[in-house]
Image: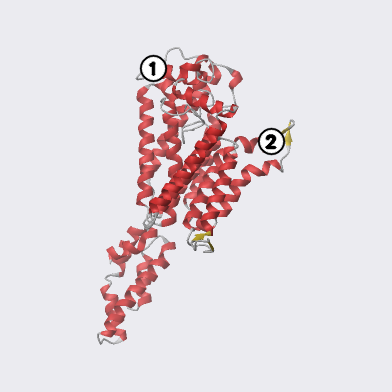
Amino acid sequence: MQTNEFLNNVCEKIKYKPIRNEISEELKNHIEEQKEAFIQSGIEENVAEEKAIENMGSAEELGKKLNKIHRPKLDWKLVLLILILIAFGILVTIIRMKNEISLDYRYSRGTNMGNYILALGIGMILSTLIYFIDYRKMSKYPMLFYIIATLCFIMPYGIGGTLNGIRYLYVFSTLILPMVIAIPLYIIAFVGFIYNINKESKIKITTQSGKNININIIKIIVLSIISLHFVMTQSIATAFILGLVYMIISTIKLSKLEKKGKKYIAILWGIPLILFLSVILIYVASDFGKYIITILIDSFYPGIDSNGSGWGAMDRNEIIKSAKLFGEVEGIGLEYRPCFEQGEAWAFISILANYGWVVSLGMLLAIILFNVKLIKNAINIKEEYGKWLTIGISTMFILQSLFNVAMNLGFGIIANFNLPLVSYGLISLIMNMMSLALVLSVYRRKDINTYETKYEKVV
């Protein structure tokens, strides 16, 4: 049997066609190495090739084993947790609909289950398309993702028609796009920059001391600051989460350096902390500074200003005290409106007030398991770009969940922290599903992209 015939027989058993060429090339190299060893021992070339092929074993059996290893896999555990969280999101939608009808029509924004199901359907279609793409091709275009995200902020200022005297494109973009579309795109772009930091142009700046600075590092820092500026114009809370995602990804990258890694990490966290404290000191005497300080105080001591900005937290605390194991809190009325308004930041409290501690703690357990699964995926992915992508997206979800739950239970700052897949928001739901589809796409290929090490075990 000739080498090409053997390789064809093996590849016929491998159902995932995109991996066939890579496996064929790997097997061919292995056969050539063994063939060369036989030739050096004095065996003729034709005989050496046959013996090398014989040592590989049965082409059919080898093909079956390789097919089992390299077939795409769906992360059923993560999918199940996503569905569970979406189910809680449906409960939030039901609560929102009930309260808009029974409390006050003035707060109604057209909430209905039909819109939610429509958004869910759109999210499933787009997520399916993303799931089957080869995510590795995205690593070549980080700047494209960055530009698209930035356009979400700057385009409305130059274009857009009007509706009843309102520039609808401007309203749409300022209220929706930056918050739910631009953030994942910025994270994907940042991951791409980090992945390509030593693979793109290696132009360096030489300082007076003779040290070289990679120009790509300067580019990442500048673009990150610009993106945070745009996001901060819309939401300080969202900018805070995005900044933390940047910092965590950078810390993981720096931790892999053999030399001066700890020093760079200290600088990475030290400089922003100093700048943050400096900004607070500058604004502390201004109206903005007083506003931030008031929010911080009311988040943990709402009783000081119960008739002002602390009234939402007071209602939250009252619901936590009055909640039952099962069922609705007695006396829910207009006075608890902040906990139901929009169904976004207070989704956990909404479920607690309407269904009790058992259901809400069940949701909390699902959130914890969801975050743990994301962490495990980030650890287990071996392919470099896929690993960075999983880390970036997972960090975004974990931070949002952490700050939202802490805020709902009275342990965190009250701000615009939404609960992924649960908080009401149709476009947010779609973007969350698409982002998680990207994580599932990475997992789908986690064994395929590491076929070299798996192949050695098979042979």
Q: Position of residue 127 (x, y in %)?
A: 49, 45
User: What residue is disc 1 on?
Assistant: 321
Q: Amino acid at mark 1?
A: Lys
Residue at 57% x, 40% y: name it. 231
Name the kind of residue labelled 2 in the image: Tyr
Instruction: Give the mark nearer the N terminus: 1 vs 2.
Output: 2
Categorize mark 1 by other alpha carbons within 10 Å: few (<14), some (14-19), many (20+): few
Q: Quadrant of the N terminus?
A: bottom left
- Residue named by callout 2: 168
Left or right of 21, for residue 156: right
Q: Give coordinates of residue 79: x percent, y percent.
A: 40, 42
Quick check: 65 left or right of 413? left
Label 1 secondary element: helix
Q: List x then y, in percent, for residue 446.
A: 38, 55
Numbered label attached to residue 400: none
In this rendering, the answer to whether 385 lies above or below 392 is below
Please say whether residue 128 is visible from this viewpoint: yes
- Occupied quadrant, residue 119: top right
Mark 1 vs mark 2, foreground winner is 1
Could you tell me residue 249's position as x and y percent? 44, 48
Residue at the extreme top of the image, as rendered:
331
Snapshot colouring = secondary structure
Residue visible at 35% across and 71% down in the picture? 27
Any part of residue 390 in sight: no
Instruction: Find the distance from the CA under tag 1 to the CA under tag 2.
Output: 43 Å
Q: Nearer the viewer, residue 101 or 307?
A: 307
